[in-house]
Amino acid sequence: MTTTITLTDGTTEDAPVPAEKRDDRTPLLEIRDLQISFTTATGTVNAVRGVDLTVYPGQSVAIVGESGSGKSTTAHAIIDLLPGTGKVTGGSISFGGRELVGLHRKQVEDLRGREIGLVPQDPMSNLNPVWRIGTQIDEALVANGFQGSRVERRARVVELLGEAGLPDAARRARQFPHEFSGGMRQRALIAIGLASRPKLLIADEPTSALDVTVQKKILDHLEGLTDELGTAVLFITHDLGLAAERAEHLVVMYKGKVVESGPAAQILKDPQHEYTKRLVASAPSLASRRIQSAHERGAEAEDLLAEHADEVEASAPDVVVAKDLTKVFRIRGSRPGGHSDFTAVDSVNFALPKGHTLALVGESGSGKSTAANMVLGLLEPTSGTVAFDGKDVAKMSAKEQFALRRRVQPVFQNPYGSLDPTYSVFRSIEEPLALHRVGDRKSREARVRELLDMVSLPQATLRRFPNELSGGQRQRIAIARALALKPEVLVLDEAVSALDVLVQAQILTLLNDLQAELGLSYLFITHDLAVVRQIADLVAVMKDGSIVEHATTDEVFDNPQQEYTRDLLAAIPGASLEIGG
Amino acid sequence: MPDNRYEKTPRPGQEHFVAPPEDVQVGVVDAVDVSEAPSSLWQEAWRDMRHRPLFWVSAALIVFVILMAVVPGLFTSASPKCVLTDSLGGPTQGHIFGFDKQGCDLYYRAIHGARASVTVGVLSTIFVVVLGTLIGSVAGYFGGWFDTILSRFTDIFFAVPFVLAAIVIMSLLQDRNEVVVAVVLATFGWTSIARITRGAVLGVKNNEFVTAAKALGMGRLAILGKHVLPNAAAPIIVYATVALGTFIVAEATLSFLGIGLPSTTISWGGDLAKAQEAIRVAPEIMIYPATALAITVLSFIMMGDVVRDALDPKARKR
């Protein structure tokens, strides 16, 4: 990766002094005992309770924590961007020797952008869709007091975009956000964040919405850029692997408090606090092998892994076989009546052996979800077949197909969308039983209770509604619901992608236990290769609708055959770190 | 970059720090909070509404108006007979509002006028909700040609001025009563609710729980009825509450113009028309039906506001 930066005009008063020359023994940002609370209808919520944080000039520091840990709140307090009723109720934030708490709004506005830049989380919603990219960067320059004529400003915009790694920047500046991909938008946001050469850049989950390979490219670029400019970076992330790879100092937050902080490598190698230990143990990017099911956990890992690999090759019959599976979508063309064909899935072949997990891995747009929907019978293949136990689904009668529904069930990604909010937990889990007329009222209720036990949720959950439960709990209910009809195959479409690391590890363990207990076969759709290693026996890597590599998990990880697979593996955050799992 | 970070001694303020274990209790991962009673979205909306004074004000007014409509005898025992000698007479004992030009008791008429207004309002709202929800949900859920045809059909009706069309139709009809007025109003008033339903259904139908129901083998109509419509109900309810008020206004308008309810039925609109004849000599006559009408409509619109706030997912705490 190359980063060439030509600092524009010779007159760069507000450009920072190169990192070497700066006195880097005085902290740039010092947060002491910060307290932040939100006022809600039910009372005051203390979101941040006494946080200490120090950032030196040119240094990169990461705050790691799960959702609700107060990491974003802390970062937003620095530039007074607390949402809603949030208020700093105590402590101090000093930036370059200046106290920021209690500053007047106007003074904070002067600081924002000029001294402290922000790269927000969601590239999709943080650019105004009705304005050209160039205009939005231009606006940032004006707001931050860029001195210079219109022409100079225009030139600077193009330069900034080029610097952020967008080729053909002059043309890109005239385009609108919808013409940009997610990665390009994030680059534009980085350009805005760095427009006025701030001394500190706050990067709030800057790449969590992007594909891993894009994420790696952008983070590499950002790192090069800030190194060169001497900008300090404060990363906010849920991903311990990413944090450890990109930052030298880590701050681990939990429930509004710092539980552990220190040099990144030390924390990762030798976590001290209970919570950090858990986090390090369950970060998928750091894990090096498959999660074991409950009864396997006692046994020797090495033997079992070897055994597992043999099993796949040898005996297990295939439950699901996809043969030359192809799906072509018709896309409406620009002229009325006109259309073009888009091949989402292109003659894909895979087989799911009974009792095992096949992971379909790919980045967004690779066709993995389309393939899954065809297996679920939600989409009809354009050509090719899906067979269950050797029987072609397309040739089944309507009655047989309805019966087949009981044998294949899905669990979806979004824990907030996969349960009907108007249904109680009981009704949600009972629905499949009622629909397929399994048993009577009493036996159905008994079955629902049994299913709740299976996914380790208390019986008290029965009468609750999805809005009262966390993402992980909803996902457990979605799993219980999917298991209600005793299916043989579960299609897990990014089923753990939206969850916090610890919860994700918990759900993965649950899935593994259930598989061992009930002999389930999983078709596991994911973009996250790190998770694949924890759960899958077989991996099929998809790219642009085709499977580029199909092998056992160990083969794919230890000896990837394709360039693309190698790229994917290298892009896992934390992949470069050497830590014993 | 060589990984020599571990070897470097941390700078002041960045030394390795570990919170004392008793400081932060690390709980069970993802434990279920069983402290609060279970509550559905509707229960939460109710809890939210209970704390709003506006809800209680509008609810009290609505109850009052409905009581007037159902048992007017609770409020007045005056005789419905009009005595011409009382024409334009001021308030007297037992006739607190006085009399109109025909010598009818104004208080009696203000109370009894509620029945016509509420009947027409409720009936047309029911018709509109049934028709609009049906058309809107079918258009939204099935999409494709259904949607194109039904949406254009809705647009055609939408283009017809609601009150004007009602005037034309009503003036053609001989036999006019509350049901007829409600049907005519509903015929031209269902379009907004159809559009709202269509939008809400479009928003709900791509949810994963709908896909999950499909994967269970549930039929399309069953999904529409069991999953999609209940989740699209909130905006429909909000609109229906406000629409009830506007239908009452529309009925009053028609009756005022003399083509709504027949003059034998007591209605606020009709009384307003009569009061208008005497506006130069006795303008105060107009106040009573007008106030009754305004309060009724206002109470429904306020209620719609409260319900919308309570059902708005963005305003919800969780």
Image: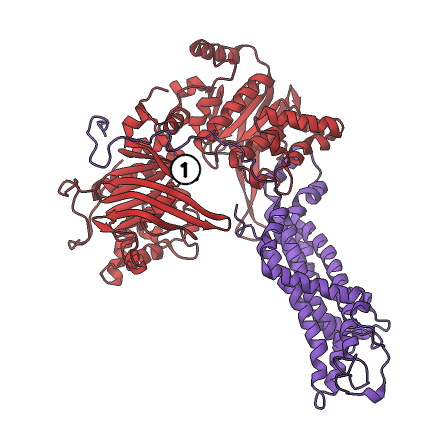
Residue closest to the eye, A431 or A566 = A431
Q: Quadrant of residue B162?
A: bottom right
Tell me the quarter of the image containing the C terminus of chain A: top left
Judging by the rendered image, the residue that carries numbered circle 1 is: A255
Chain that is coloured red in the picture: A
What is the quadrant of the N terminus of chain A in the image?
A: top left
Please provide percent x and percent y for residue A38.
43, 49
Query: Residue B8: x, y in percent?
Result: 19, 29
Q: Give residue A207's position: percent from left, percent from top.
A: 38, 39
How packed mark 1 is, by other alpha carbons closer than 10 Å (few <14, some 14-19, many 20 or more), is many
The residue closer to the viewer here, A242 or A502, is: A502
In this picture, is A19 found above or below B295?
above
Quick check: can you spot residue A542? no
* Residue A339 % position (x, y): 56, 46
Looking at this view, name the residue that lies furthest to the front: B93
> Mark 1: which secondary structure?
loop
Q: Colour of chain B?
A: purple
Find residue A580 and report its image quarter. top left
- Answer with the quarter of the image where residue A331 lies: top right
Q: Is residue A572 left or right of residue A326?
A: left
- Residue A521 is at least partly visible in this image: yes
* Residue pictured at 60% horizontal, 54% vertical: B49
Amino acid at the residue labelled 1? Lys
